[in-house]
Image: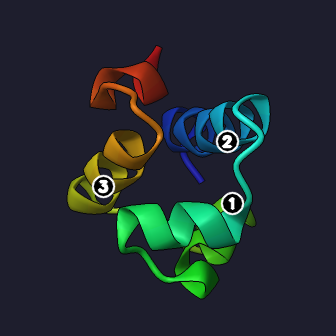
Amino acid sequence: MDKEVEKVINNIRKFRTEKKISILTLSVESGVSRSHLFYIESKKTIPSLETLAKIAHAMDLKLRDFFE
């Protein structure tokens, strides 16, 4: 897996845990299935930009926050 992709995935988990949001809550808020979120955080799948945008919106973040 590319290091940049890994960084984005790590940032998703970091922001989610910092905001104390469960995967279930994030799933409900973002419209992304719980299993898909689990696979993303487990680095078993790479999220599309559309999925990243949904996750960012649900956590009240900008898409670019995942890349910084």
Residue 7: percent from the left, percent from the top? 60, 32
Q: Which residue is mark 3?
A: 54
Q: Which residue is mark 1?
A: 41
Question: Between residues 14 and 68, which one lies in front from this camera angle?
Answer: 14
Amino acid type, mark 3: Lys
Q: Which residue is mark 2?
A: 16
Q: Are marks 1 and 2 in contact (CB under 8 Å)?
A: yes
SS category of the residue bearing label 2: helix
Residue 20: percent from the left, percent from the top? 77, 40
Q: Which tag is nearer the camera, tag 3 or tag 1? A: 3
Residue drawn at 68 percent across, 65 percent down: 23
SS category of the residue bearing label 3: helix
Q: Earlier in the sequence, mark 3 or mark 1?
A: 1
Residue drawn at 30 percent across, 55 percent down: 54
**Is residue 12 among what the camera can see?**
yes
**Quarter of the rendering occupied by the N terminus:** bottom right
Amino acid type, mark 2: Arg
- Neighbours of disc 2 within 10 Å: few (<14), some (14-19), many (20+): some
Q: Note whether 49 is above or below 18 in the view shown.
A: below
Amino acid type, mark 1: Glu
Q: Earlier in the sequence, mark 1 or mark 2?
A: 2
SS category of the residue bearing label 1: helix
